[in-house]
Amino acid sequence: MIPVDDALAIVAGAVGPLPSEVLSLADALGRVLAADVHAAFALPPFDQSAVDGYAARHADIAQVPVTLPVKGVVAARGYDQRPFLDLGTMMRIFTGGVVPEGADTIVRQEATEPGGDERTTVTQRIETGADYRRAGEELAAGSRVAKAGVVVTPGVVGALALAGADTVSVYATPRVTVLVSGDEVVPLGAPLGLGQVTDSNGPLMTALLQSWGVAPVAVAHIADSEAAVRDALARAFATSDLVLTSGGVSVGDYDFIPAVARELGADVLLHKVAQKPGMPLFVAKRGDSLLLGLPGNPGAVFVNLHVYVRAALDVMSGLDPRARWRRARMPDGVRREEGKTFWLRARAVYDADGRVRIEQLGHQASHMLSNLTDANALVRIPPAGEAADVVEWLPL
């Protein structure tokens, strides 16, 4: 068995970022930018008003109260040429409107009172340049809006759209195949016979992948026979960047996946990690396809998905796997394993002072999943004997 840190390094080092592709901004949500994105024009693209009010020369309104004629209206719309402000006058202007040539200050409507027909009185002292948005004050044309490695969230979509980026370069989505092994496993909804269990690993793996923005290219059940495993793995290696299996990786008579992977020419990178649950993790690589063979117990599947599978997907997508980890104080009374990292499904609670407190949950055995209805954290508990005042955890 190898330590968790060594296993993580092996998995992350076995893959690299996938090739990039250019997508429309509308199709890039959830993807990772493969190249910097620059503003197509300045932001704002023209001098504009920040409020509803009046465009004025500050010299004309320096002494208040002052009443000036209002000549013209500037709405928030397109213009063939920039409006012009006559000396000794103001222009009605609305939020986002083009500031007229000659104006240097915007007078908020709240700082005025009607002064008669087509006249307005400025009643409050206004600073020079008040509520005047200068062209390019946020970003100059050609400046970077977002750097490579940024996830395209709805907020990023808005920022890039405002800057005129209609297409972006993003990393390709990994092609993932999910294979569920075990003759005792029956599909969800089917009646259970004696010795059979409902398939939770297939739905669990598929749901997590989908929540991470990855739709598996194939999900299949494979029988506990060497021929079935060989056929399924060969097809998965040929069509996938990442192959995920559940079950069939330990030392039982029906655990064919490690031996068959070797027969198919895969290089074994690791087999067994000093952790609980999930010790019999099997990792191999054939060509550009990475295989992560997960133990069959659903708790072990859940742990290895969050720790190792997510790390591989992060690297493939141009992200840093370490960025997901958080830190908190070691919870009281937690059990620690001799020579093994223990993965605790827990609840992270933020106290009034902003500190994170880890609350343990019951039903931690590797065949159990019921505590996931309350868990929001996967906590890395170091082996017994190691310093552990502070622990790392992953948000779920």
Image (cartoon, rainbow, N blue to C red):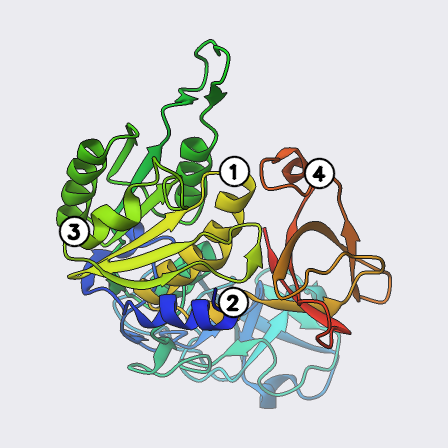
Q: Taking the image as drawn, is residue 49 in sight? A: no
Label 1, on which residue?
Answer: 298
Image quarter for residue 120? bottom right
Label 4, on which residue?
Answer: 363
Residue 201 higher or lower than 51, as above or below: above
Label 3, on which residue?
Answer: 263
Give me the residue at 15% from left, 44% from top. Answer: 234
Marks 4/3: CA distance? 38 Å
Between disc 2 and disc 3, whose residue precedes? 2
The amino acid pointed to by label 4 is His
Secondary structure found at label 1 = helix
Give me the residue at 31% from left, 40% from top. Answer: 178
Secondary structure found at label 2 = helix
Q: Nearer the viewer, residue 8 or 117?
A: 8
Between disc 4 and disc 2, whose residue precedes? 2
Secondary structure found at label 3 = helix
Q: Nearer the viewer, mark 4 or mark 3?
A: 3
The amino acid pointed to by label 1 is Pro
Secondary structure found at label 4 = loop
Marks 1/4: CA distance? 12 Å
Between disc 1 and disc 3, whose residue precedes? 3
